[in-house]
Image (cartoon, rainbow, N blue to C red):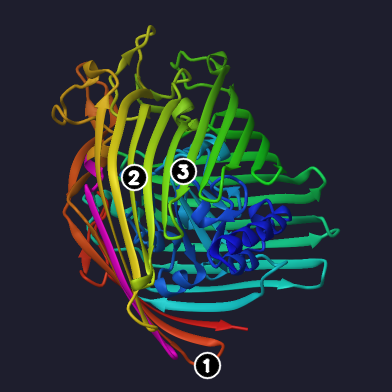
Amino acid sequence: MTKKIALLAATATSITALSAAASAQTIDYGSLEMLFDEPVTTSATGKPQRASDAPVAMEIISAEEIQRSGATDIPELLRFYAGMSVQRSTMGGVDVGMRGYNGAFNERILVLINGRQTYLDFFGYVEWAALPVTMEEIRQIEVIKGPNTALYGFNAVSGVINIITYNPMYDENFQVTVRGGTHAFKESNLTLTKKLSDKIGIHMSAGLWRGSDFTTHLDNRREDILRDDTKRNFLSGTVMVQATDNIQAGFEFSAVDSEQGELFFDSTFSFTDYVTSSLRGFVTAETGAGVTSLNVYKNKVDVTANQIRPVEGEFRVSDIEATATIFELSQLFKVGTKHAFRLGLGYRDSENSTFPVAIASFDQTVWSGSAMWDWTINDQLSFVLAGRYDSLKMSRTGDFLEGVLQTNADFNRTINEFGFNAGLVYKMSDKDTIRLTAAKGIDLPSSTEFSVMADLGDPVFQLGNPDLKVSDVFNYEIGYERSIESIEGSFKVNTFYYKANNLQNTQQNEVTELSNGHAAFFAENSLDTRAYGVEFALKGRMNDALDWFANYMLVDVKDTLTDPADDDGAFGADDTEAIDFANNAPKSTFNFGLNYKKDKFDASIKGSYTSDRRQLRGIRDHIVDDGGDTIESIVLNFVPIKGQIQLNAVAGYQLNEKMRLSVEAIGLSKKFYRQTSLARIERRFNVSLNYKF
């Protein structure tokens, strides 16, 4: 059989295989991966496809890679992949970004668990310690770089990370892990994935971990009294039912309670307690018209943030409550053998208490419609075009602080936006692939930026701005990938241009005098930003026991004030007040690793180098103004973060068929090292015992 005939046969088989699976929670990833001899993804277009066909720059991290990484959480795993930025501020506090855009409470990445959105609406960011998932239950992690608004809507502007767990209808996985180490670290977790009968399967996971936070100096001694032990407890479960040969349904729940110190959105230190929960139901049905998927879920979060105030011994305790109800309906169908279409309808209703004074409620309702066209032009060329239209209505109910001149009617507003993704994939040969992509994403201001309300001391307030503009984000990219038989590996290069307009800023704006003699700092659209960059990735195998990888990213980020007249020169002519992507982004990032596995022994060492950068650090202080009034303020300083190499290592031994013992080191190259403007973090060692039933 010639290669062309084999390709046509595989394509015909794939049409049958993909017709029965259209959403992340219903796909038999293992069977499809065996069919194509490569990973399969749904995260790029909403349609199951081979990773090599995806019209986006992406990484797929396998369960084997997760195990041999030695990482105890997802951010530490992501650190070593091209284009990723991981900045850890405490044992549990960490921010993840892509391609030069990261910072405290980074709101530019959409994180999903089996397709369920996990970002917290009040700041639009992801609290990684509050994700209800263990490393041992993850089948694969799909990382898309660049905006994907056409599929996921607002806020998927730097990229999408979809965490896929084992599916009880197709996989069996029963593991228990216990882990202990330095900093009084203790962790135990259990995950069970099992098909109980031909019709029913269950997936359950639970875990807890405890640890003492790092003890290095916080640069503000008053903040030290806020430090406490880090903890995390969680429970999640899924029941899936094969109702008929063509209908699959499921129910999912999760609950998490996590506490840790962290770098807060205003660049200050906070010790924060997150209590999150989620309930979800989903159904997928194959009919003569294609595959219909319905996904309905509700996320809830209660947050208690403890921060030091300027007066010693006095604290600010902010309580935030937020809920989001999401409805997603999609239809995937084919027309002939060359055209696949996906139509989607979405509804999202979110409600958040005002922050930090919870005396009102801020509501956002979004209706969306989307469409995707996937055209297989020929055996070598394919084209994907997707678009999405979102209509958001927002409103506010409740009270205002005395002296605030805003009214609830000011927040009655409708925002309509359109985003798109387009991608062309050209397979020059069975070894060479070129991708051309273009995208427009939509970065919606968070609920806090719309409605924050704080009394900084009579007569000054910090207030949200209901008239904030949406930020339009554009990304253009050219990628090339080649498989290299001589090293049993591949080479990738991606060049990209990224541009965002009207980014929002809640800090350090010019004070506005109110007509009643009061004054306020309003959230503003104060920044435009752009980035040029290139990524290289190379991986291969030396022999049956040893494989390796290396990747490099060079990125140049430029920030400019939307209105140059707003630059008060406080930090120099090239600075942009409280938003500082350009200086916080390392221009060069280089990652490398070696993995060894023979018989019962395996070992891995990974290194990550980041070049010099700096990050803002906020210290709460009080200022006496010209009128003699004392107001609360945040004094911002730049903290230099020197270029450094972080080494992580793991060594494991398979004691028997079911039990594995491993030793993990994080930050092996240096006892103390700085990744953010908070305290330096510390080297850690862990010992883990994993038992597979």
Q: Bin the neighbour count of mark 2 within 10 Å (Cα to Cα): few under 14, some 14-19, many 20 and up.
A: many
Instruction: Report the magenta residues as a range.
Output: 583-605
Q: Which mark is residue 125?
A: 3
Q: Residue at x 74, y 55 (%)?
A: 20
Q: CA distance from mark 1 to mark 3?
A: 42 Å
**Quadrant (top left/top right/bottom left/bottom right) for the C terminus:** bottom right
Q: Secondary structure at mark 3?
A: loop
Q: Secondary structure at mark 2?
A: loop
Q: Which is nearer the eye, 206 or 610?
A: 610
- Can I make out residue 15 in this image? yes
**Quadrant (top left/top right/bottom left/bottom right) for the N terminus:** bottom right
**Which is closer to the viewer, label 2 or label 3?**
2
Residue wearing tag 1: 656
Please, is residue 233 above or below residue 426 in the view?
Answer: below
**Kind of residue sitting beneath label 1:** Asn
Q: Of label 2 and label 3, which has the lower sequence position?
A: 2
Q: Of label 1 and label 3, which has the lower sequence position?
A: 3
Q: Which is nearer the eye, 610 or 374?
A: 374
- Can I make out residue 649 in this image? no
Residue wearing tag 2: 102
Q: Where's residue 472, x and y in %?
A: 43, 27
Q: Residue at x 43, y 35 (%)?
A: 438
